Image: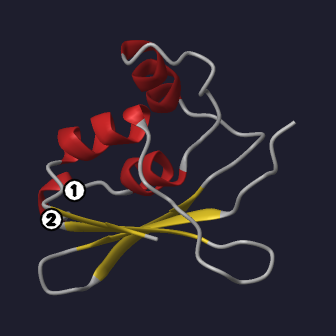
Amino acid sequence: MSQKQNITALVFDKRGKLLSMGRNSYVKTHPMQARLAKEVGEEHKIFLHAEVDALVKLRDWDRAHKLVITRYTRDGEPALAKPCKVCDRIIKMAGIKEIEHT
C-alpha cells in the first residue's frame, strides 16, 4: 500500500498574487478529476489532486499564470511533486505559463 502524501498547489497571477490553493485528498473527488482521469486513461486516479483542487476553485482561469506544487516528507524534506498526466491536462486547459514543483 502506498504512503499517503500531502501535496499543495498554489496558483498565482503575473504579479505574484495568490489566487487559489488546493490540496490532494484521499476521500474526496470532483467531476473534473474523474473526467480528466478517464480522458488520459487513468480512471483509477479519481481522488482529488492538489492541482485540480486549486484550479476548480479558481473562477477566472485567465488570471492564472503560475502554478507551484509542493510535497514534503514526514521529516520535512522536499519530495518530487511533478504533475501526473491528469494534472498536466488541467494545467494546459487553464493556460498556466509557469510551473514549479519540488
Residue depicted at 52% across the width and 62% down the height: 80
Helix, strand, or loop for circle 2?
Answer: helix
Q: Hey, which quadrant is residue 86 in on the image?
A: top left
Tell me where residue 71 sits by quadrant: bottom right
Q: Residue at x 78, y 40 (%)?
A: 27
Amino acid type at circle 2 is Arg
State the quadrant of the N terminus.
Answer: top right
Q: On screen, 20 above or below 2?
A: below
Q: Nearer the viewer, residue 40 or 54?
A: 40
Q: Dots 1 and 2: beta carbons under 8 Å?
A: yes
Residue drawn 44% across the image and 52% down it = 51
The disc label shown at residue 60, or none: 1
Q: What amino acid is labelled 1 in the image?
A: Asp
Residue 65 x %, y %: 16, 66
* Relative height, residue 85 to residue 96 (above, below): above
Residue labelled with disc 2 = 63
Location of residue 99 by image quarter: bottom left
